[in-house]
Image: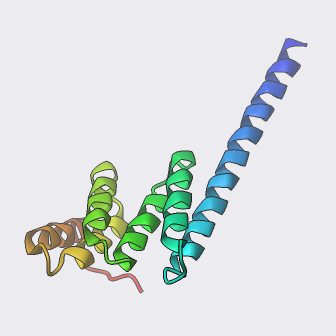
């Protein structure tokens, strides 16, 4: 009897976790979709809100990377760079964060761009480029 109760509790916890993951994925997709329509009134605020909520419910950094792209697309490179640097600090093997950092800081902060390119080279010592 106790084993059955334990199995039910584990199943309920797993269902709850799956539900939160699904919600985070939907919010991230909705945020990315809103970011693609930045010219519409309120689209930036909706996208930013959805991506922030998705980040709270998702242990992955993809909502934060999407929010950095949102900021960059809206011309807010300072917050985009700060967010990408935060992701790169927490996940030093995150190629997407380093590549975006290298691209965004190329002209504004050449030293940061060099560090980002060095991190990319460390992650890919043979120099293979993604296609």
Foreground: 108 or 19? Answer: 108
Residue 115 screen position, x and y as percent: 14, 66
Question: Hey, which residue is sitting farthest front in the picture?
Answer: 41
Q: Quadrant of residue 34?
A: bottom right
Res 27 seen here: yes
Q: Is residue 130 above or below residue 116?
A: below
Residue 20 screen position, x and y as percent: 67, 46
Residue found at x 59% / y 75%:
33
Q: Which quadrant is home to the C terminus?
A: bottom left
Question: Hey, which residue is sitting farthest bottom in the picture?
Answer: 131
Q: Is residue 7 above or below residue 108?
A: above
Left or right of residue 89: residue 73: right
Left or right of residue 41: residue 104: left
Foreground: 74 or 69? Answer: 74
Residue found at x 30% / y 73%:
99
Residue found at x 56% / y 67%:
31
Question: Hey, which residue is sitting farthest left in the picture?
Answer: 111
Residue 127 screen position, x and y as percent: 25, 79
Q: Which quadrant is home to the N terminus?
A: top right
Res 126 seen here: no
Its colouring scheme is rainbow
Residue found at x 39% / y 79%:
73
Question: Hey, which residue is sitting farthest right in the picture?
Answer: 1
Left or right of residue 58: residue 110: left
Q: Quadrant of residue 83?
A: bottom left
Q: How many marks?
A: 0
Foreground: 65 or 120? Answer: 65
């Amino acid at each position: 009897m106790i084993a059955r109760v334990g199995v039910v509790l584990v199943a309920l916890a797993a269902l709850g976790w799956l539900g939160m993951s699904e919600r985070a994925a939907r919010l991230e997709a909705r945020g990315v979709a809103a970011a693609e329509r930045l010219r519409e009134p309120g689209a930036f605020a909706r996208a930013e809100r959805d991506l922030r909520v998705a980040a709270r419910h998702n242990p992955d950094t993809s909502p934060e990377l999407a929010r950095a792209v949102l900021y960059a697309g809206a011309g807010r490179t300072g917050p985009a760079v700060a967010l990408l640097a935060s992701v790169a600090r927490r996940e030093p093997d995150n190629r997407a964060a380093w590549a975006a950092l290298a691209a965004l800081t190329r002209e504004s902060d050449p030293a940061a761009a060099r560090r980002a390119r060095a991190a990319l080279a460390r992650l890919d010592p043979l120099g293979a480029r993604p296609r």
